[in-house]
Structures are given as C-alpha cells and as structure tokens.
Amino acid sequence: MELSNSRIKLLKQLEKEILYDFKDLKILDSAFHHISKVNEQEDSSYKSNERMEFLGDSILGLVFSEYFYKKYRDIDEGELTKLKSEVVCEESFSNAAKHFNLGKYLILGKGEEKSGGRQRNSILSDTFEALFAAIYLDSNSYSTVYELITKKHINIFDNYLKINKNNYNYKAILQNYVQIKYKSKVKYRLDKSIGPDHAKVFFVTAMYNNIELEQGKGKNKKHAEQKAAKNSIEKLGIEIE
C-alpha cells in the first residue's frame, strides 16, 4: 500500500522528533497500524503492529539491561532487574510516547478512535515499542537503537524517574557513587525490627568500609534499605542527574 503525500509529510515530522531518518517510511508507518483498524480492513495483507510490539519490547528490554549493567557496575542481579522493571513498563513507555506525541500518528479503527484510543496508555506504550522495533528493522542495527535511547533520548527516562521518585532506585544511585568515589561496596546492616509479625518495622543502616551513613526504616528490609540509601544520598549531597 502506497503512502499518501499527507501521510509522508506527517511521518517526516516524526523523523525529526526521534532523530532518525528511515530508509523505508513504510516500516515506520506500519508501527502505527493498530489492530482495531486491521479488523475493519477487507484486505488480509493489512497487518497490525502487534508483532513489532513484541520485537520492540525485547529490544528495549535488552537496551536498558545493557545500559544499567554498564552504568551501575557493582550492583547485583536483583537490583539491576528492579531498576530495569522501573523503566521497561507501560507507564514509562506511555510517558515516552507522549513526549513524541505518538498518538497523533496512530491509525485506529472507528470504535477505538471514538473511545479515546489515541490517549490510552496501553496503546501508547505498545506503539512506543513498535516504533523502536521499526527503527531496528529499518537500520538492521541494535547499536542504532541503543545509541538513540541511551545517548539522544535518555533524558526522557531520567525525567520520568525523577518525577516518580517512589520508583527511583536509591540503592543503585548510592552504590554507583560509592563505587566511583571510594572503590567500595555499600552494605546494609539490620539494626532492629519492632512490632508484631503482621506489622513489623525494620531499621537498617547503610555503610561502606565500616563507615556508617544514614539509617532508614520500612515495612520490610528492602524498603528500609531504600530509605537508608535515600537518606544517605541526601546526607552526602549526591545530585540525582
């Protein structure tokens, strides 16, 4: 199916926003074919972007896994997994989609259009995944996607994390700082727990090289550790970039 001049003009606008020029604009266009539109087509060759969503999810998961692996060199698998999950999720990707105004480019069925599909987070998140799958397919290069996300658009995700501080991984930030400045690893000492089993409060102190930083409390050890890390970050005056 040939693209109309108006569609080409619209997609060219998006290329400027995402900082990538497609060799084949049809690949970019296909990232916006929602299943609701496909169901209205008599032409069976008209495909939705669902397969691209699947591919994009895997690619973006790898991008952020590699990015955090390189950025935070001394945190364990569990912390890396948690950090990745805070970014590779519907809320984060829909936020990024809104940054690029991806709803504007969607091709929706009549029912989905009327029900506000262009602003629906689940659709926007899926579209963001499909978009970066399209970039991967057009460039035939994982490194192109990696560079776009981690060099040119990482501020979108940094700002998202700053706004959603409850999702911010303070332990990872503190560990990265201590590793670079002191070549050491942060440890967390359980000081005490109080209260009945169903409502215990845990008190934990962050430390490195036997130097005590700040204490934190929480409803479980992990929450207390995050609070201790947050309090230590504030004490040390570490700026969250």
Image: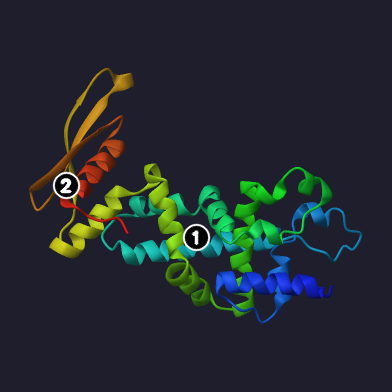
Name the residue at 61% across, 47% down: 121
Which of the marked residues, 2 or 1, is nearer the chain's N terminus? 1
For image coordinates 16% across by 63% down, the residue present is: 181
Q: Quadrant of residue 135?
A: bottom right
Of residue 164 and residue 89, the one placed in the foreground of this image is: 164
Mark 1 crowd level (few <14, some 14–19, many ≥20, 10 Å Cα): some
Q: Position of residue 74 (x, y in %)?
A: 26, 60
The figure's colour scheme reads rainbow
Q: Given the image, on which type of amino acid does mark 2 rest?
A: Lys
Q: Position of residue 179 (x, y in %)?
A: 20, 61
Q: Tell me the CA gap for discs 2 and 1.
A: 33 Å
Q: Which mark is residue 235?
A: 2
Residue 150, picture quadrant: bottom left
Q: Which residue is mark 1?
A: 61
* Whole-percent x, y for residue 105 in the image: 70, 62
- Label 2 sits on a secondary structure element that is helix
The amino acid type found where label 1 is placed reads: Gly
| Residue shown at 30% from the left, 37% from the top | 223
Mark nearer the viewer, 2 or 1: 2
Q: Is residue 178 above or below residue 30?
A: above
Above or below: residue 72 compared with residue 10: above
Query: On the rendered image, what quadrant is the N terminus found in?
Result: bottom right
Are there few (<14), some (14-19), or many (20+) residues within 10 Å of tag 2?
A: few
Picture quarter containing residue 104? Answer: bottom right
